[in-house]
């Protein structure tokens, strides 16, 4: 337990559970009343608040032992806990203000991405070729360590993998009697999952791929069913995604440590085969650290670095990094860096080669403190609007459904950070959407509202009668 006053511990427990419950209620209640959709970027952002503000506060009450404690202290005065909690509350208040009371970016986002190619078998083939070509280019660039191409296609390959799975499932789900469409989906899903595990030890890409069919089913079918039924089926489907996360957690770092192996396809498959059901179940023993990932504690480390150890503040560094991301670092070595990526190695000089998620409070300590919080609340709201408003306009649009799927984990973990890295990841989903819309239009043409009146789809027959489309 922490060496803090009982009143501070009680405050953290109360605030932690409040942060868990309130965002969840903001997701469930409007959906249950038919006033909002369930599978949206806004829901994912609120879920991120629940995890990286609520569960993070609960984790801070009784944190697990960390290897970093061999090098730095994780003992903090009561004022640090209260200050970090207060900044989280302030950010959450700003987030709700800019989303509900001052709907920033709503009109702007609703007018974006208006032209799409109508769905057809030919269009599906074109989309699959575009996604495959992007993934293959990314893989070759990564394996060959090709300058420029590696930087450009590394993240775009991740987006293309999820888009491809979403398109393949969408194609089969519209025609579930087609064995060919089912086989194509199975092959695309397997290839995308292997690609995800082969190229990255991160969980986000694999979880986006696993969740893509759920996103497709919701927007083309489930959203027109009863709320109770959808939440029950959705909970069962989500549990499958959670199991995938727990399973991958068991072996995702097989290429690290003294016994680490090269991250090849054969070694990935070998590591996969060694996982047992007991290994998966064991991951549940430490659920709070697995979810919160030390965000609250790392935020307080940042506060100590800035206030007690003279670390230079870089105002709005997240925005600086995001705006200059497209400039290759080889041409500008001193361009802004994401603080979460350098705090362990460059600032604290620890031997571990890792990064920390500092949360919004931690990033604010480094980037200007109070005034940075409303700025980043606006950034998150704008990202959410750009994802949600188009799909509310055309719920059956596979381009928008794929965008929701490919961005979902990055929106959830945006609150963990690094904010700059996650902002870029979400923007890249939108960039890939923009590019693939225009490239596919060359094959199938495009028009405004191509899916708003897609009455060839049986699900869309109920579109105008659904209150969530208002």
Image: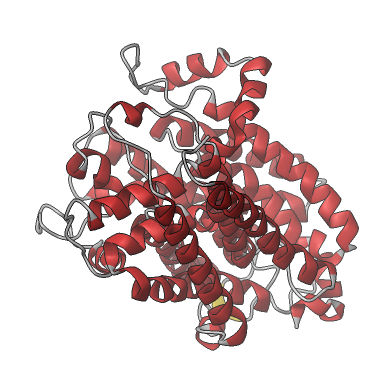
- Residue 130 visible at all: no
- Residue 392 visible at all: yes
Return the x and y of residue 119 as percentages of the image width and height: 65, 65
Observer-nearest of 297 and 271: 297
Return the x and y of residue 181 as percentages of the image width and height: 70, 44
Q: Residue at x 78, y 47 (%)?
A: 235
Left or right of 132? Residue 401 is right
Count of residue discs: 0
Left or right of 103? Residue 469 is right
Q: Quadrant of the C terminus?
A: bottom right
Return the x and y of residue 145 as percentages of the image width and height: 22, 37
Q: Is residue 48 above or below residue 161?
A: below
User: Which image quadrant for residue 49?
Assistant: bottom right
Q: Residue at x 56, y 84 (%)?
A: 106
Observer-nearest of 341 and 234: 341
Q: Is residue 166 above or below residue 318?
A: above
Observer-nearest of 137 and 219: 219
Return the x and y of residue 62 as percentages of the image width and height: 54, 36
Q: Residue at x 18, y 55 (%)?
A: 311
Q: Residue at x 45, y 76 (%)?
A: 378
* Colour mode of the rendering: secondary structure
């Amino acid at each position: 337990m922490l060496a803090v006053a009982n009143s501070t511990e009680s405050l953290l427990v109360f605030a932690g559970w409040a942060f868990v419950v309130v965002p969840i209620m903001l997701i469930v209640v409007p959906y249950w009343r038919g006033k909002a959709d369930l599978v949206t970027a806004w829901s994912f952002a609120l879920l991120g608040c629940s995890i990286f503000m609520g569960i993070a506060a609960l984790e801070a009450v009784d944190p697990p032992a960390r290897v970093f404690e061999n090098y730095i202290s994780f003992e903090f005065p009561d004022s640090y806990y209260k200050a970090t909690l207060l900044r989280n509350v302030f950010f959450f208040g700003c987030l709700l203000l800019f989303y509900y009371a001052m709907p920033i970016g709503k009109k702007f986002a609703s007018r974006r991405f208006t032209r799409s190619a109508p769905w057809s078998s030919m269009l599906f083939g074109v989309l699959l070729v575009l996604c495959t070509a992007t993934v293959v280019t990314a893989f070759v660039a990564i394996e060959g360590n090709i300058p420029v191409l590696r930087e450009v296609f590394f993240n775009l390959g991740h987006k293309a993998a999820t888009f491809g799975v979403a398109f393949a499932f969408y194609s089969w789900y519209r025609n579930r009697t087609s064995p060919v469409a089912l086989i194509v989906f199975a092959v695309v899903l397997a290839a995308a999952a292997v690609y995800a595990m082969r190229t990255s030890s991160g969980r986000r890409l694999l979880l986006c791929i696993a969740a893509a069919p759920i996103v497709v089913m919701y927007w083309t079918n489930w959203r027109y069913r009863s709320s109770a039924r959808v939440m029950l089926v959705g909970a069962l489907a989500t549990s499958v995604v959670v199991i995938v996360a727990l399973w991958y957690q068991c072996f995702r770092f097989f290429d690290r440590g003294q016994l680490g192996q090269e991250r090849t396809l054969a070694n990935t498959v070998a590591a996969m085969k060694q996982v047992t059901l007991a290994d998966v179940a064991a991951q549940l023993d430490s659920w709070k650290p697995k979810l919160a990932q030390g965000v609250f504690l790392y935020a307080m480390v940042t506060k100590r670095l800035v206030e007690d150890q003279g670390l230079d503040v870089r105002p709005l560094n997240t925005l600086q990094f995001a705006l200059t991301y497209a400039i290759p670092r080889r041409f500008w070595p001193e361009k802004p860096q994401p603080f979460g990526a350098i705090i362990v190695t460059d600032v604290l000089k620890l031997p571990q080669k890792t990064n920390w998620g500092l949360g919004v409070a931690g990033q604010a300590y480094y980037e200007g403190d109070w005034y940075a919080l409303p700025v980043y609340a606006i950034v998150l709201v704008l990202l959410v609007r750009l994802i949600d408003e188009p799909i509310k306009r055309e719920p059956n649009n596979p381009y928008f459904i794929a965008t929701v799927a490919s961005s979902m984990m990055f929106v959830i973990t945006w609150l963990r950070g690094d904010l700059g890295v996650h902002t870029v990841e979400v923007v890249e989903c939108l960039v890939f959407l923009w590019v693939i819309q225009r490239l596919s239009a060359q094959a199938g043409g495009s028009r405004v509202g191509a899916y708003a009146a897609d009455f060839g789809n049986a699900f869309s027959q109920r579109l105008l009668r659904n209150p969530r489309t208002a």
